[in-house]
Image: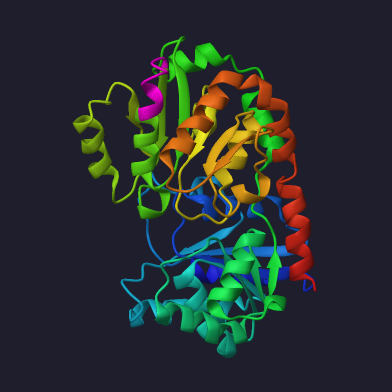
Amino acid sequence: MQNLLYLQMNQIQPSKIKLLIGINAFDMTGAPRLIVDEINNLDRTKYQLVLLTFFEVGAENNFFDLLPDEVTSYKLNFKNFYDIKNWFKLCKILKEYKPNMVLSHLFFSNTVLRILKPFFKYKIVIYEHNTYTKKTRLQVLIDRILSRLTYKIIAVSGTVKQFTANQEKINSEKFVVLSDSINYHHIQSKIEGCDKDELKQKLGFKKEDKLIINAAKFNWQKNHQLLIDSFAEFSKQNSDYKLIILGNGVLWDFFNQYIKKIKMEDRIFLLGRQKNILDYMFISEFFLLTSKIEGFCIACIEAMAIGLPVVSTNVAGPDEYIVNGFNGYLVKSDNKEEIVAAMQKVADQGRNSFSDNCRQTAQNYDVKEHIKGLEAIIRQ
């Protein structure tokens, strides 16, 4: 089977650029969603594409089913950085495929694929997806040293570029700002003709329920404590609202118990990872983000494409596209009172008063514009 794939990969026109896209894991989070859109929109007459992942994820928690059949996926399962067996497997893949360029996401993938660059002579472009305040000194040093082997660093927002360049002392000329994106027209086609009340009942809610949505992995970064406490305070004056939280993570069990402890289990619903996230957004009134750090937050732009205003803490990404009173509200991080006040403003004004502005904002981040920028980097 591998020999057949090798023959197929080499029976292509010489003019095609061979791209290898690497990422830690292809789970249901922001970076893999961006990769799905990139792979589905890059011109296959110009590029040959291979996806490489370093860690396995559960069959129900990945985006592999969204990839075109003709795109080969190599799934490694590194136990740790010193997993010699998987290093050899990776070297074999690189030797046979001979990529012209590698596009890499997240620290482990970025580190391994840059270390191997001198041996396989490809250009490598890495993505910085966040303002990683918890990088260790060693990680910062590794990134600084390996930046010398890096062709370009794609920062998903201007704030990420500035933060990373300063933290890692890398020349800002090494960076290119290329915002994350969504497939705006695909989203519109998914919701066209949908009846909000019917869909609400289909998903287990009452017609009269007013819903607020959050979609985020349960970890320290996403600050679910502030999310839940803010909603609990908001709900004291707004008893007709409920909160939907989509996502899994290491803190899911803790917050599931916490919600029971504060007796909000009939108002706050932890629904785990859902592939039909757009359906839940469509039945909601607004999107609420309380993260400590971000890079761009694709979920916020998806929500805006649906027509939802966004209330967000002042983090990278939302700080560039949220305009107070126009498409939502930006508030200080860790300030529950300000978050509740912003939630109340949106509730009082209503979703419809923001919807056109939100969709207008989302169109600025359509994947077609992202692909133009990515191709410019590839072909420089």
Give the residue drawn at x 57%, y 71%: 164
- The residue lying toward the viewer, choosing from 22 and 223, is 223
**Residue lying farthest to the front in this orientation:** 337
- The residue lying toward the viewer, choosing from 216 and 170, is 170
The secondary structure that most of the magenta stretch takes on is loop
Percent across and percent down for residue 199 are: 50, 17
Give the residue drawn at x 36%, y 54%: 220
- The residue lying toward the viewer, choosing from 293 and 216, is 293
Give the residue drawn at x 57%, y 66%: 128
Can you see residue 379?
Answer: yes
Percent across and percent down for residue 44 are: 73, 57
Give the residue drawn at x 54%, y 83%: 144
Q: Is residue 245 magenta?
A: no
Q: Which residues are magenta?
A: 233-240
In this rendering, the answer to whether 144 lies above or below 317 is below
Query: Toward which corner of the image does residue 55 lie, by quadrant?
Result: bottom left
**Residue lying farthest to the bottom in this orientation:** 119
Percent across and percent down for residue 121 are: 63, 86
Query: Toward which corner of the image does residue 48 lie, by quadrant?
Result: bottom right
Report the quarter where the C terminus lies: bottom right
Can you see residue 282?
Answer: no
Answer with left or right where residue 371 lies relative to residue 75. right
Query: Toward which corner of the image does residue 98 lie, by quadrant?
Result: bottom right
In this rendering, the answer to whether 119 lies above or below 213 is below
Percent across and percent down for residue 54 are: 43, 67
